C-alpha cells in the first residue's frame, strides 16, 4: 500500500513536523504528548461523564451518524473497513488520567475491533426510533477507544408504518458513534472519507471547507498619500471590532437568556430533562439552495439559517405562541472551525460563537438579507479567535470547575446548537455497501439542530425534548415552505 501521512497521537498542539509514514495500522505508536485545551476539556467530559456542572445532569453525548443501506454489511467487510481507519491514532487509543489526560494506544487493536461492533433487530418503525434515540443518548465506554458500531436490521415478520418525524427509511442501518474527544466535525468527515470510496472506487468528493479570505486590515501594497488615511481608518475599525469581540465574549455567558418561545422555554437554571428524541425532516434539494445562493450573492449557510429562522417563526404561529408577533431573541451556539494546517489530522480546532436568528413577521428575502449581513459580520470579526483565546487563558488559570460553569452559562442562554456539515457530493460505499442516505444526531443541554448534505440533498434533523417541543417535525415542513417561497420570489 502507498504510504500516507498519519495523524500522530494527536496532540492538537503538537509541532507540525511531527508525523509518521505508515504502511498500515500495525505501526509503532508515537509517544503521548499533551492535549490541546479543547481536546482536554472533551476528554474530561468522556472520563467524568459530563462537560457541564453536575447539577445540569447532562451526560457526555456521542456524535452519532446513521447510514442506511440496501443490505447489511457482513463481518468481513466491517472489519476490513475498520482496519483502514485505524490509521488514525485516536481511534486506537483510550483516554488515560484523572485530572490531566493523555492518549494511550491499545495493544493488538486489530484483534479487538469486533468487540466494538454489535448487531440488533427491530420489528417496527417505532422500535427503530427507540433504538436510534437510545444510541444518541447512551454514553460511550470510556475504558476503551471512544467509538462503536451498531448494525440494525429488520426482524422476520416486521411491520412498518412511517410516522411524522421518523427516519423515513427502513433498515438495514449502520450506526457509527464517536466521542467528540476524537475530533471535530471537519476531522470526522476525514475519517468518513478514509472509510468510504465512491461507487467507481475513486476517492470520495466532499465540499471544500475553505472560507473566502478576509480583506486585509493593512495592505502595504496599496499605500499612497491618497489612501493612507483609509488604511489607518481600517486599522482603527479593526481594533474597535476586537474590543467589541472581547466584550461580547465576556458578556454572553452572563447576559440575558433567549426569549421564551414555543421552540425553547429558556429558564434561569436549565437542566437536562432526561428526554431526547431524534426528529427527521424530509430532505430538500441542494440545487434549490445553490440557486438562491447564486442569485442573492450569499452562502449556502446563509440560506439555511434564513429558512430555519422562518420555519421557527411559523412553528411559533402553529403552536399559538404569543411571542410570534414580536421579534424574540433567539440565538444558536454555532461551532466555528478554525483553518487547519494539516486537513488529514484529527483535531478539535473550534469554538462556539453566538449567532442570532431573525424571527418575527418578515418577508423571506428580508430575512435572508439580515441573516447574510450578520453572518458576514461574524466571518469578518475576530470574535471566534478572541473567544478561543479567552477560553484558553481562563481554562489554564481558573481550572476545570470554572470552565465547565462557563460552558454551561454560555450554552444555557441559547435556544439551540446549530451545525451544518457538508457530506459527500456523490453516492459512496461504506462497509462494502452503497449508502442510500444518512442522518446525523447528537444530544445536548439545549435543542440540537443539524443539517447534513449527501448526494445533492440536504437533511434537517433535530434532537429535542418531545414534551417541550411537540410536533417538531412541522419545522421541517415549514423549512421547505420557506425555501419554496424564496425560490418563487427569485424566478
Image (spheres, grey):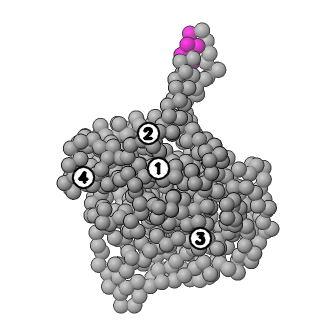
Between the C-alphas of marks 3 and 4, the distance is 38 Å
Question: Of marks 1 and 2, which one's residue comes earlier in the chain?
Answer: 2
Between the C-alphas of marks 2 and 3, the distance is 34 Å
Question: How many numbered marks appear?
Answer: 4
Can you give x and y, in whole percent of width and height, for residue 192 in the image?
57, 64
Q: Are marks 3 and 1 in contact (CB under 8 Å)?
A: no
For the N terminus, the image quarter is bottom right
Q: Crowding near pointer 4: few (<14 within 10 Å), some, many (20+)?
A: many
Between the C-alphas of marks 4 and 2, the distance is 24 Å
Residue at the top extreme?
225
Q: Is residue 142 above or below residue 484?
A: below
- Whether residue 200 appears in this view of the structure is no
Question: Of marks 3 and 4, which one's residue comes earlier in the chain?
Answer: 3
Q: Quadrant of residue 102?
A: bottom right
Between the C-alphas of marks 1 and 4, the distance is 25 Å
Please state which of the two labelled residues, at mark 1 or mark 2, is closer to the viewer: 1
Q: Crowding near pointer 3: few (<14 within 10 Å), some, many (20+)?
A: many
**Mark 4 secondary-structure assignment:** helix
Question: Of marks 3 and 1, which one's residue comes earlier in the chain?
Answer: 3
Q: Crowding near pointer 1: few (<14 within 10 Å), some, many (20+)?
A: many
Can you give x and y, in whole percent of width and height, for residue 278 in the image?
39, 67
- Whether residue 26 appears in this view of the structure is yes
- Tell me the tag on residue 375: 2
State the residue in front, 232 or 3. Answer: 232
**Mark 3 secondary-structure assignment:** strand
For label 1, the residue is 409
Range of the magenta residues? 226-231
Q: Are marks 1 and 4 in contact (CB under 8 Å)?
A: no
For label 4, the residue is 316
Please state which of the two labelled residues, at mark 1 or mark 4, is closer to the viewer: 1
Amino acid at each position: 500500500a502507498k504510504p500516507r501521512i498519519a495523524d500522530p497521537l494527536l496532540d492538537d498542539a503538537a509541532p507540525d513536523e511531527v508525523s509518521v509514514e505508515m504502511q498500515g495500522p500495525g505501526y509503532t505508536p508515537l509517544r503521548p504528548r499533551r492535549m490541546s485545551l479543547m481536546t482536554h476539556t472533551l476528554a474530561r467530559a468522556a472520563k467524568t461523564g459530563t462537560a457541564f456542572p453536575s447539577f445540569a445532569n447532562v451526560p457526555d453525548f456521542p456524535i452519532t451518524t446513521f447510514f442506511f443501506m440496501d443490505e447489511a454489511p457482513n463481518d468481513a467487510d466491517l472489519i476490513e473497513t475498520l482496519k483502514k481507519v485505524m490509521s488514525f491514532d485516536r481511534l486506537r487509543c483510550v483516554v488515560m488520567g484523572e485530572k490531566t489526560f493523555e492518549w494511550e494506544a491499545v495493544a493488538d487493536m486489530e484483534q479487538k475491533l469486533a468487540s466494538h461492533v454489535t448487531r440488533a433487530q427491530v420489528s417496527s418503525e417505532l422500535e427503530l426510533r427507540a433504538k436510534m434515540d437510545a444510541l444518541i443518548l447512551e454514553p460511550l465506554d470510556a475504558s476503551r477507544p471512544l467509538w462503536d458500531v451498531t448494525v440494525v436490521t429488520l426482524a422476520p415478520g416486521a411491520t412498518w408504518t412511517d410516522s411524522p418525524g421518523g427516519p423515513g427509511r427502513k433498515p438495514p442501518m449502520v450506526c457509527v458513534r464517536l466521542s467528540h474527544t476524537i475530533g471535530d466535525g471537519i476531522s470526522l468527515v476525514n475519517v468518513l472519507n478514509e472509510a468510504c470510496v465512491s461507487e467507481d472506487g475513486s476517492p470520495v468528493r466532499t465540499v471544500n471547507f475553505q472560507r473566502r479570505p478576509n480583506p486585509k486590515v493593512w495592505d502595504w501594497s496599496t499605500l499612497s498619500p491618497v489612501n493612507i488615511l483609509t488604511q489607518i481608518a481600517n486599522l482603527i475599525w479593526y481594533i474597535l471590532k476586537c474590543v467589541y469581540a472581547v466584550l461580547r465574549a465576556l458578556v454572553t455567558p452572563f447576559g440575558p437568556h433567549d426569549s421564551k418561545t414555543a421552540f425553547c422555554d429558556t429558564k434561569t437554571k436549565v437542566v437536562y430533562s432526561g428526554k431526547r428524541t431524534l426528529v427527521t425532516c424530509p430532505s430538500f434539494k441542494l440545487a434549490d439552495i445553490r440557486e438562491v445562493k447564486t442569485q442573492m450573492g450569499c452562502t449556502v449557510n446563509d440560506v439555511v439559517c434564513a429558512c430555519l429562522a422562518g420555519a421557527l417563526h411559523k412553528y411559533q404561529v402553529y403552536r399559538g405562541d404569543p411571542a410570534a408577533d414580536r421579534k424574540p431573541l433567539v440565538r444558536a451556539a454555532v461551532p466555528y472551525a478554525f483553518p487547519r494546517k494539516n486537513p488529514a489530522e484529527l483535531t478539535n480546532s473550534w469554538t462556539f460563537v453566538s449567532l442570532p436568528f431573525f424571527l418575527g413577521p418578515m418577508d423571506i428575502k428580508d430575512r435572508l438579507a439580515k441573516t447574510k449581513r450578520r453572518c458576514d459580520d461574524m466571518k469578518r470579526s475576530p470574535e471566534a479567535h478572541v473567544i478561543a483565546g479567552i477560553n484558553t487563558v481562563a481554562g489554564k488559570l481558573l481550572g476545570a470547575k470554572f470552565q465547565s460553569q462557563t460552558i454551561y452559562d454560555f450554552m444555557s442562554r441559547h435556544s439551540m446548537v446549530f451545525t451544518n456539515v457538508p457530506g459527500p457530493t456523490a453516492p459512496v460505499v461504506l462497509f462494502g455497501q452503497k449508502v442510500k442516505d444518512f442522518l446525523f444526531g447528537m444530544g445536548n443541554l439545549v435543542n440540537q439542530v443539524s443539517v447534513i448534505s449527501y448526494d445533492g440533498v440536504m437533511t434537517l434533523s433535530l434532537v429535542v425534548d418531545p414534551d417541550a417541543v411537540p410536533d417538531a417535525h412541522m419545522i421541517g415542513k415549514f423549512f421547505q415552505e420557506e425555501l419554496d417561497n424564496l425560490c418563487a420570489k427569485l424566478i
